[in-house]
Image: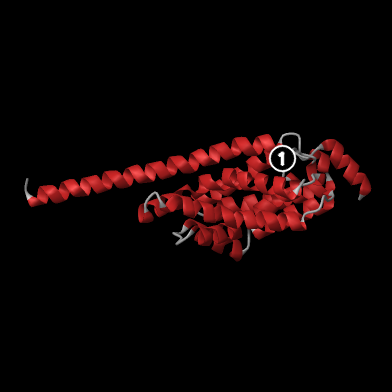
Amino acid sequence: MLLSDKVAAASRERTSAGTAATTAALMATLGLAAISWVVALRQMNGMDMGVATPLGPFAFFVALWVSMMAAMMLPGAAPAVLRRAQAGGVRAVPLFIGSYLAIWTLVGVAVYALYRPHGLFAAGAVVIAAGLYELTPLKQHFRRRCRDSARSGFEYGLCCVGSSIGLMLMLVALSVMSATWMSVIAVLVIAQKLLPAKAAVDVPLALAIVGLGILIVIAPSSVPGLTPTMAEAIGGQL
């Protein structure tokens, strides 16, 4: 065999090995996300009480939050995971994913420390603020960074927190134990990670979120996903 043939064969083997590594990384990432959806939905079953939802014991909430973040965030993080696998091999993927989820775990700890069951006005105000944040340059900056290559899961996680924090606070305000709202927010987060920013889409979406917040304040019974009986009870307390 000629030297050129040997070099070509070695190149094909490396390409094949690289393809296998990225495929394995992708399947593992999406598989973990799918398992996390099942775990999170089981943990949340019967816990949704609308805006008055309690978080429960610390250990329970943190375990639930981690499974929620893995379910909601990992599908959109797949391109970043693939880039990390190509650069550092499959062995670099667990550390990348683990450190990425560690950042979101810290966010969950902060949520637990600051969260209190609240009323409809507070929920609506948070949703309005989340919609306005979608229009800020800071949001757009972090969204671009979240689509760029990152040297570590920590760096990638910080950028993605900056991009998605408004939407996540919206979930917490509406009901962190709601499978419906979790699914809606997950779709938005994944779309923003995978698709380029376009004002024709992003601005109407932000305005729709603001409109949802206003609707929660003035006509909560018309908003799907809020528990009607809880909404009425809290509304009477405001």
Q: Nearer the viewer, residue 15 or 184?
A: 15
Which quarter of the picture shows residue 130? bottom right
Q: Which amino acid does label 1 sit on?
A: Ser
Label 1 neighbourhood size at 10 Å, few (<14), some (14-19), many (20+)? many
Q: Give me the residue at 86% from left, 36% from top.
A: 229
Horizontal and vertical percent position of residue 236: 93, 45
Horizontal and vertical percent position of residue 93: 44, 51
Q: Which of 168 and 136 is in front in this view?
A: 168
Q: Residue most toward the left?
A: 2
Which quarter of the picture shows residue 185? top right
Horizontal and vertical percent position of residue 102: 58, 55
Horizontal and vertical percent position of residue 234: 88, 45
Describe residue 69's horizontal placement relative to residue 17 as left or right.
Answer: right
> Which residue in the structure is indicated by mark 1?
178
Q: Give me the residue at 55% from left, 60% from top.
A: 159
Compared to residue 63, the image places residue 128 above or below, namely below
Q: Give me the residue at 11% from left, 47% from top.
A: 5
**Under tag 1, what secondary structure?**
loop
Q: Residue most toward the right?
A: 236
Describe residue 68's horizontal placement relative to residue 191 as left or right.
Answer: right
Which quarter of the picture shows residue 47? top right
Compared to residue 40, the image places residue 207 above or below, namely below
**Can residue 20 be seen in the rendering of this structure?**
yes
The image quadrant where one finds the N terminus is: top left
